[in-house]
Image (spheres, rainbow, N blue to C red):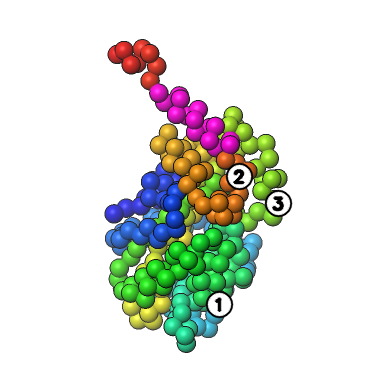
Amino acid sequence: MSLGFSVETLLPSARVSGPLRMGLVRLPESEWLADAPDLAPRGEAFDANPDAVIVMDEAREAEAELAAMLGIEGGLEQIGRTHWEDFCLLTRDDAGRWVLTGAAVAFPTDWHLDEKIGKPMLAVHEPIDGYADQLATAVDKFMDGLRAPHIFGRTNAFVMANGNWRYLPSDTPEERFAGVTADNAGERLFVRCERETLRKLPKSGAIVFTIGVHVAPLGTLSDAGVARIAQSIEGFMEGEGDRRAAPHYAAALAGYADRRLDQSKPGPREEAA
């Protein structure tokens, strides 16, 4: 199965309602990483943010194995500079937990690597409402059972106030979405999808977790794409919706989606024909 490499193609597989779920699909090797991307934004991000790469000693073996697999001379930073995806390495600690021990993250989505590095999966995902109760056990079980060379992927979708590759807002949600209305939502709101994959390295046993960020203005999406993301307004639980700042753009998104729906309906002459 292919998830695609754009917001439009990723949205059908993105969770926009209901409880948390992994939503994994099996991917062929050819669908692991984006082909021939424009790497200029990634180089600029790494140049400007040296803290975007952290590799602990526990991840050095996996880092070298991944570089060899990809034919890259260098470590995680060079790997991240030569691919569209961000790369994270997960290794087991003495307690058998999967821990984030290395990463090159040029395009974070509202998180800081230095706050996550060295933490097990439960702590890494702590801000996600419901993760501990609904998903933590399933994630741990999946990662324990993952075998090389299998590759699995999933995607999510967020509504954002800008199209920045590095989405690290420092203002309040009220300020961020101020002035967004149903009239201008097509230009003022952006849909951001993270295309995530997991695979295990055969020698070190570490897990490679990739994050490919794809962004599009709401107004550039098809009617089906707009309708899909609009489902998230009522689809998420209150805690998750609040974390995503949904109350601050929900009315604008719903109004815009309704207008797109009305515009797509056939007129009297089209119905008669």
Q: Nearer the viewer, mark 2 or mark 3?
A: 2
Would you say the residues marked 1 and 2 are in contact, meaning their CB atoms lie under 8 Å apart? no
Q: Quadrant of residue 154?
A: bottom left
From the viewer's perspective, is residue 201 above or below residue 27? below
Amino acid at pointer 2: Pro
Q: Which mark is residue 171?
A: 3
Residue at 30% from the left image edge and 61% from the top image edge? 26
Badge 3 marks a residue whose secondary structure is loop
Q: Tell me the distance, in whole angstroms, between the alpha carbons under discs 2 and 3.
A: 16 Å
Q: Which residues are magenta?
A: 251-265
Q: Tell me the distance, in whole angstroms, between the alpha carbons under discs 3 and 1.
A: 28 Å
Amino acid at pointer 3: Asp
Amino acid at pointer 1: Gly
Q: Residues within 10 Å of mark 2 (few under 14, many from 20)?
A: some
What is the residue that sits farthest to the bottom in this orientation?
94
Residue at 45% from the left image edge and 29% from the top image edge? 261
Q: Which mark is residue 118?
A: 1
Q: Who is closer to the viewer here, 270 or 17?
A: 17
First-in-chain label (3 vs 1) = 1
Badge 1 marks a residue whose secondary structure is loop
Q: Return the x and y of residue 250 as percentages of the image width and height.
A: 57, 40
Q: Return the x and y of residue 211 as percentages of the image width and height.
A: 47, 60
Residue 60 visible in the shown view = no
From the viewer's perspective, is residue 230 above or below residue 27? above
Q: Which mark is residue 247?
A: 2
Q: Return the x and y of residue 6 as percentages of the image width and height.
A: 42, 47
